[in-house]
Image: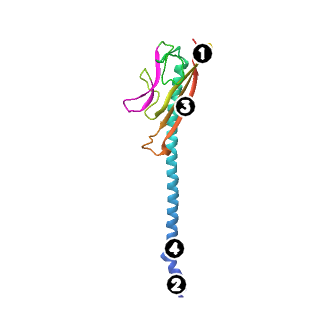
Amino acid sequence: MSSKKYFAKMRKKNGFTLIELLIVVSLSVMLMLASSGLFLTFLLGSTKVSRSQIIKNEGEYAMSQMEFLLRNAVQLFDNGSGQICETGMSAITFESIDSGVTTLFSEVDPSDSNTKIASNSGIYLTSGDVEIIDGPTFDCSESSDKLAQYISIRFTLRKGTPTLDQERDIITQEFISGVGLRTF
């Protein structure tokens, strides 16, 4: 057996060369880095979607409850300003169909120090998962014959704390709606 054939046969039996091992290891590292980058991107994206969904659910629930209560109000009351129907009210007081008096406003919940939309009945329309950063604001307008009243409702919710969370993790959404009071 010639020496060329012997060394060629021995090389095949001894395994991989150093170059082959380096190529395989570097390709494996690149694939792992790419997959971990995709995984982290997925995690950050799903966190943002989750926070957006929480804000959307909280805001829509609070708005639907306020719309329902105001739509079924019998009459509005003066909040201390001397006028029943005005713009820029931070609270609104009205009589319900069941003759109960309800006030909608924002207040700081002493149990968790978060600002929430509340009613005087002790019910919070938003939870501690979100924070109200503006509103609720109620703008009242009347028809020219003063028989019909229309209430615009506006508030802004935020999920995330600017001093603790990164800017990309802070979600803010404004909610605006309006409702006409029924004339009974």
How many numbered marks appear? 4
Distance, label 4 to label 3, CA atoms, is 62 Å
Image location of residue 134, percent across then percent down: 49, 32
Count neighbours of disc 3 (C-alpha within 10 A) and say few if under 14, some if 14 to 19, many if 20 or more.
some
Query: Helix or strand or loop: what does disc 3 sit on?
Result: strand
Question: What residue did someone put label 2 on?
Answer: 6
- Segment tinted magenta in the rendering: 100-118
Question: What residue did someone put label 3 on?
Answer: 175
Image location of residue 8, percent across then percent down: 53, 81
Mark 1 vs mark 2: which is more N-terminal?
A: 2
Which amino acid lies under the numbered mark 4 shown in the image of this protein? Ile
Distance, label 2 to label 3, CA atoms, is 81 Å
Which amino acid lies under the numbered mark 1 shown in the image of this protein? Ala
Distance, label 4 to label 1, CA atoms, is 85 Å
Residue appearing at x 44%, y 44% in the figure = 165
Distance, label 3 to label 1, CA atoms, is 24 Å
Which label was assigned to residue 148?
Answer: 1
Mark 2 vs mark 3: which is more N-terminal?
A: 2
Image location of residue 81, percent across then percent down: 48, 18
Say which of 90 and 166 sits in front: 90
Which amino acid lies under the numbered mark 3 shown in the image of this protein? Phe
The reply to whether the C-beta atoms of the residues labelled 3 and 1 are less than 8 Å apart is no
Which label was assigned to residue 90?
Answer: none
Mark 4 vs mark 1: which is more N-terminal?
A: 4
What residue occupies the far left of the structure in this picture? Answer: 111
Question: What residue did someone put label 4 on?
Answer: 19
Distance, label 2 to label 4, CA atoms, is 22 Å
What residue occupies the far front of the structure in this picture? Answer: 82
Mark 3 vs mark 1: which is more N-terminal?
A: 1
Where is 154 relative to 95, above or below? below
